[in-house]
Amino acid sequence: MVTPVHRVLPSPPATPAHPTDAPAPSPTTGPTGTPPATLSAGAPPTATSPAGPPPTATARTSSAPSSAPLSPAVRAPSFRHLGPQWYAPVMGTAIVATAGAGLPGDLPGVRTVCAAVWALSLLALVAVLGARALHWRHHRDQAHAHLLDPALAPFYGCLSMALLAVGGGALVVGRDWIGVRAAVALDAVLFGAGTLVGVGAAVVMPYLLIVRHRVEPGRVTPVLLLPLVAPMVSAALGPLLVPYLPPGQTRQTLLFGCLALFGLSLLATLLVLPLVVARLMTAGPLPLAVTPSLFLVLGPLGQSTTAAGNLADAAPAALPASTPYGSALAVLYGVPVMGFALLWLALAGALAVRARRRGMGFSLTWWAFTFPVGTCVTGAEGLARHTGLVALDALAVALYALLLAAWATAAVRTVRGLVSAELLAGPRRAPAAPRPATARTR
């Protein structure tokens, strides 16, 4: 006699081909090891610490009739999970304009296209600032949770770099459209705000990492570098304002201030970068979704090379006696650092290709392919300017081609994710229990 028996068939656990190929722990993972929710495409997939309160996505139901007025949280539901990582597209777009304007040769129409790209970055900055303001107004609990989450807190450094990148682009190419006076005023405002935010992030984020976050050595990622790179962006773009300031103490103050920011960022990076390398050497490749963050290491390398060249260019206007030495120091520093940057670019690129072949999907971390590579472009352009080597011009062109390809890919995928609302969707909870299944036994 055949008796129907209802059995619960649990789903077999997914076993990755390599231990490090497993998806990164979700920011919604609880301290007790409860099953995490599935991350949306827009959530940064880095490890979270059990020390801080994890942000959770809870489904809200209302018993009020449909005619009742909507609460603020319901009026702006699409902004609840909009984190600070959304400043990365602004940075990546602005660097395309700035780096393109410094390419060798004088091709017609290049500056016009770069100015249009800069205008797009300015519009994107205004849009993200407005969306983040709505996020803080309507979803303050989620914003506080982001600040206390080690997976998201370092991305507050992106706010500083977005302000600085758009401001610097105003002086480089934006002045062609808005005029020199408006460009200087806009850059001065964005440079001041970006520098204050960047220095604040460089202090607050390590403080939270020490007293609140707990990141195990095996979970260290290059995302930790983000708040430390922001002062270096100020050091690289601040010298552009020096010629527009009154001669004397004002110019010298800005120049030496940028030099101090250079040292702040460089020495802090030298403290954290060995942790990243040690994690790779001892624990293997990063999880697939976090692999693009390896390109963030190029940020302090390329940006410091750019800063050294720009400081050398601005030094004669503030310190006439420094003219014979600035260019030589910039070359002596920039060439070895650029060599290491190319080594890291090859290594990170190989790991990114490996991750893509193993199923790495799109997320906002793909914007890490843009801004760091753009800093290497501007660094190579500065070295070519100070040495006159055609090889460095060719390097800048090759890196810019790579930057354009990365930006086009990330931009298309981001627009597609915004249209489908996937990038703004919150985490989805995993099923609480396996589904029952019916089986027959004899």
Image (cartoon, rainbow, N blue to C red):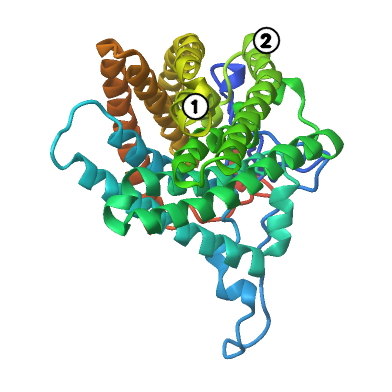
Residue carrying label 1: 320
Q: Amino acid at mark 1?
A: Pro
Q: Nearer the viewer, residue 177 or 32?
A: 177
Which quadrant would residue 300 be assigned to in this image? top right
Residue with the most extreme left position: 108
Q: Nearer the viewer, residue 110 or 70?
A: 110
Can you say whether 68 is above or below 258 in the image?
below
> Measured from the top left, where is residue 414 in percent x and y?
39, 48
> Measured from the top left, where is residue 440 in percent x and y?
58, 40
Q: Secondary structure at mark 2?
A: helix
From the image, which quarter does the N terminus lie in? top right
Q: Residue at x 52, y 64 (%)?
A: 130
Which quadrant would residue 44 be assigned to in this image? top right
Q: Residue at x 52, y 22 (%)?
A: 321
Question: Closer to us: mark 1 or mark 2?
Answer: 1
Residue carrying label 2: 282
Tags 1 and 2 in contact by the CB under 8 Å rule? no
Q: Secondary structure at mark 1?
A: helix
Can you say whether 371 is above or below 123 in the image?
above
Q: Amino acid at mark 2?
A: Thr
